[in-house]
Amino acid sequence: MKLSTKFLLVVIVVTAVFSVASAALVKRGLDEIRQNEYNAVVSVAAAVKKKYPEIDDREVVELLNGSYGGQKTEELLRRYGIEKDYYILPEEKYSYSVVIAFTVSAILAFGAVAALIISVYGMIKSKRERELTHYLARINSGDYSLATKRLTENSDSVLESEIYKTTVMLREKSEQLKKEKDCLKDSLSDISHQLKTPITSMTIMIDSILDGEMPEEMQKEFLGDVRSSVEHISMLTQSLLTLSKLDADTIEFKSAVTPLCTILETCRSSTSAIASAAEVEVALECDGSALNCDPKWICEALTNIVKNCIEHTPAKGRVMLSGRDESMYVRIEISDTGCGIDKKDLPHIFERFYKGKDAGENSVGIGLAMAKTIIEKNGGYITVSSEKGRGSRFVIKFFKQAEGKR
């Protein structure tokens, strides 16, 4: 049973009960009035007889009934010295049935009007519920092209407002999911390509070795290539697992106030072998500031950036790590003297699996994307600027206010 129907039945029952109770109270009131009338008549009759004993009882009755010689009762009583304040007589005769009928009719009329209003309201509400139900059904079916504004115009309904906000949220979620689905599709395609090439190469080399007709020196060379491919696949797999954990928020970052020089020195040490092989100098400049972050993961992020700089810096080039405390934030800057980033590639440099035209042969396009995610999850943000042929500069800022919130 609908709420409006229940409420209508309650109104009808309450009206009926109130009508019976009102009729009983009116009857009781009328009985009291009639009893007061009788008492007043008896008092007046006794007062007249006491003061004028010679008056006949019949004459007293006619006097009180107002039918004595066509004269008014008040005038006759004044002749006998009785003022109106001494008695209580009604000016009109009351009818029990008329008064009770009028009272009950008024209450029933009020109840009927209330029931009619509730019925009309219930019909309007049912219509609106059907409209909203149909509206939600269309949303659930994926139709977001509805006139949502119509539902909220000239109305302060909280429900309609929430439906409008929910519709907008669902549309945004749907668009976001579509983008993520397309991104996942592209990512899987890139991953498949990244794995397919080394696996195919490894298969060919292993088959060649197993044939037994290959010179020992060439076998060693092929085995070295297989080992390099395995390391590449291992690195790619580890990076993908890390990205997945970051996306799922399953990595627990443990913030600690750490000297900035310690973080940068660790980063330089972990890239020293790569820098030495590429004949690139990695310099360090730092003040005595500290950073509230997860030092392990921040080192991971900075290492990925430094590796990227080393890969794009020619021999005898230089990569510079610097860190200092500004008034509002802690600033880390990583710059190189490499080839720079093309303007077309610059807006996409932090996108996953994106490889610019100057990317290395073994580049996967994960390192910078992972670094950006780690930095942001530690309360910072990263920007990059570059000029073709004049190197690149990565600037990372950790605002002190953001540090206090973590």
Image (tube, rainbow, N blue to C red):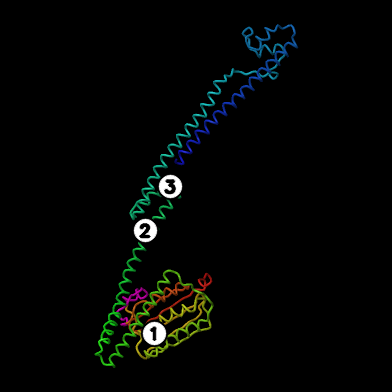
Front residue of 80/313: it is 313
Residue at the image position 53 percent from the left and 24 percent from the top: 102
User: Marks 2 and 3: CB-CB under 8 Å?
Assistant: no
Binning the other alpha carbons within 10 Å of mark 2 as few (below 14), some (14 to 19) or many (20 upward) gives: some
For the residue labelled by badge 2, is the local secondary structure a helix, a strand or a loop? helix
Q: Please state which amino acid type lies under the numbered disc 1.
A: Asp
| Residue bearing the label numbered 3 | 155
Between the C-alphas of marks 2 and 3, the distance is 23 Å
Image x and y of residue 381, in percent: 44, 73
Residue at the image position 42 percent from the left and 50 percent from the top: 160
Binning the other alpha carbons within 10 Å of mark 3 as few (below 14), some (14 to 19) or many (20 upward) gives: few
Which residues are drawn in magenta?
A: 343-361
Relative horizontal placement of residue 126, taking residue 220 as reference (left or right): right
Between the C-alphas of marks 2 and 1, the distance is 43 Å
Front residue of 105/250: it is 250
| Residue bearing the label numbered 1 | 336
Q: Please state which amino acid type lies under the numbered disc 2.
A: Arg
Image x and y of residue 86, in percent: 70, 18
| Residue bearing the label numbered 2 | 171
User: Marks 2 and 1: CB-CB under 8 Å?
Assistant: no
Between the C-alphas of marks 1 and 3, the distance is 60 Å
Q: Which of the marked residues, 2 or 3, is nearer the chain's N terminus? A: 3
Image x and y of residue 61, in percent: 66, 10
Does 112 sit above or below residue 232?
Answer: above
Q: Marks 2 and 1: which is nearer the front?
A: 2
Q: Please state which amino acid type lies under the numbered disc 3.
A: Ser
Q: Marks 2 and 3: which is nearer the front?
A: 2
Front residue of 229/159: it is 229
User: Marks 1 and 3: CB-CB under 8 Å?
Assistant: no
- Image quadrant in which you'd find residue 189: bottom left
Front residue of 213/35: it is 213
Residue at the image position 54 percent from the left and 26 percent from the top: 103
